[in-house]
């Protein structure tokens, strides 16, 4: 998975507690499914074993230009995400995850199809530091700091901004009239 022409900046480690999270999720799902309750004594050890194999298959590598993710036991998935395509890295922590001191990092990219994240990595150790490292490297790849708003400098820019302001004011007034009509109905 590691190309020889790229320098690895961070090799993510996964917290073994993620197995407990997966097991609890499987057990809760099993309890919610009435037909599987009698099979719980068989499912729990099997789920524990499979989650261990699944955890061992997880790899996440930050290089100078990409984020490489692979996982899977029976079906192996590998994704290489160019850093300049990453739009956001979110952190997710549900109540069970909080109690196990786990977090999931979700990677969203420009132009991805469908809602949700392209990649979700549950159980990365130091998830916040990993997210910050990826975002910092992304900013370095894309040429520095994100674009900032600047004040208009030319007469044409000032005129255009005045036109935009007038249009926005008109839209606001129209929305207020619509809201007033809808509340009176």
Image (spheres, rainbow, N blue to C red):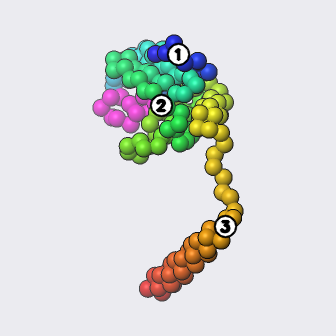
Find out whether residue 5 is within the magenta segment: no
Mark 1 and mark 3 lie on one chain; the one further toward the N terminus is 1
Q: Check the picture and name the quadrant holding the C terminus.
A: bottom left
Front in this rendered view, residue 100 or 144:
144
C-alpha separation, residue under disc 1 versus residue under disc 3: 46 Å
Question: In the rendered structure, which segment of residues is drawn in magenta?
Answer: 24-37
- In this orientation, does residue 169 appear? no
Please state which of the two labelled residues, at mark 3 or mark 2, is closer to the viewer.
3
Task: Count neighbours of disc 3 (C-alpha within 10 A) and say few if under 14, some if 14 to 19, many if 20 or more.
Answer: few
Task: Count neighbours of disc 2 (C-alpha within 10 A) and say few if under 14, some if 14 to 19, many if 20 or more.
Answer: some
Left or right: 159 in relation to 117: right
Up-down relation of residue 151 to residue 122 (above or below): below
C-alpha separation, residue under disc 3 versus residue under disc 2: 40 Å
Find out whether residue 32 is within the magenta segment: yes
Mark 1 lies on a secondary structure that is loop
What number is the disc on residue 154?
Answer: 3
Task: Count neighbours of disc 1 (C-alpha within 10 A) and say few if under 14, some if 14 to 19, many if 20 or more.
Answer: few
Give the image location of residue 66, x and y in percent: 52, 27
Task: Name the residue at 38% across, 45% down.
Answer: 114
Is most of the magenta stretch helix, strand or loop? helix
| Residue ID for mark 2 | 81
| Residue ID for mark 1 | 5
């Amino acid at each position: 998975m590691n190309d020889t022409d790229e320098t690895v900046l961070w090799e993510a480690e996964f917290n073994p507690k993620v197995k407990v999270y997966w097991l609890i999720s499987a057990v809760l799902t099993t309890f919610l499914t009435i037909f599987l309750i009698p099979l719980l004594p068989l499912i729990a050890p099997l789920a524990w074993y499979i989650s261990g194999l699944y955890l061992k298959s997880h790899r996440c590598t930050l290089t100078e230009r990409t984020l490489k993710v692979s996982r899977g036991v029976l079906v192996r998935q590998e994704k290489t995400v160019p850093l300049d395509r990453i739009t956001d890295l979110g952190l997710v922590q549900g109540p069970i995850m909080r109690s196990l001191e786990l977090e999931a990092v979700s990677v969203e990219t420009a132009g991805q199809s469908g809602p949700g994240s392209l990649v979700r990595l549950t159980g990365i150790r130091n998830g916040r530091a990993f997210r910050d490292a990826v975002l910092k490297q992304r900013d370095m790849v894309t040429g520095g700091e994100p674009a900032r708003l600047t004040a208009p400098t030319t007469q044409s820019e000032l005129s255009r901004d005045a036109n935009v302001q007038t249009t926005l004011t008109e839209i606001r007034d129209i929305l207020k009239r619509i809201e007033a009509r809808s509340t009176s109905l």
